[in-house]
Image (cartoon, grey):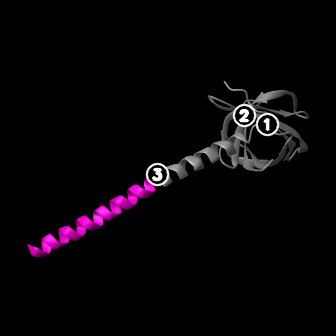
Amino acid sequence: MRDAGTFLMRFSRTFLRQRSFMRMYRVPIFAASLVVLATHLAAAQSKRGTWAGTSTTQQGTQAFTIVLDSAASGWKGAAVAPATTGDSLRLMDVSVRADTLEFGIPVNGITVYINGVVTGDKFSGQIWMQNNSVGSVQLTRKNAPAEKPPA
């Protein structure tokens, strides 16, 4: 019985120390989490704007431009490849994460997907059609995104 009492006293002292230790660090951990979240949102917002460059496929290299914007409902945009079509095509399934960008472009009943990495004002990606890599894309942001007016 004496061993059980000693064990309980040691356990309760250790438990109380650990609990106060965790209480001390709860606020800084929460604050750090908020900073990471804010940084992630700011990085995603930096993808807004006009991106121009080239796409390279078996048919050769051609000019390629996309325009990205964020809305309350998510990301949206359009793409133009003047050699293929003079019309802009609405982007589908746009996904923007910390340093990645993915979107689809509907072309002749098939969705062509582009995914890649954004580094600063440069985008480097692959073109995918029916789960096959069919080319690459290299884009540079034309100008810094304008500030969006408050909604």
The Cα atoms of the two marked residues, 1 and 3, are separated by 35 Å
Q: Which residues are magenta?
A: 1-27
Q: Position of residue 78 (x, y in %)?
A: 77, 31
Q: Secondary structure at mark 3?
A: helix
Pointer 1 residue: 145
The quarter holding residue 59 reads top right
Spot occupied by residue 111 in the image (x, y as percentages of width and height) = 71, 35
Residue carrying label 3: 27
- Position of 140 with respect to 44 (left or right) is right
Q: Is residue 134 left or right of residue 99?
A: right
Give the SS element for disc 2: strand
Of labels 1 and 3, earlier in sequence is 3
Q: Is residue 63 left or right of residue 15?
A: right
Q: Amino acid at mark 2?
A: Ile
CA neighbours of label 2 inside 10 A, class few (<14), some (14 to 19), many (20+): few
Drawn side of residue 103 relative to residue 21, left or right: right
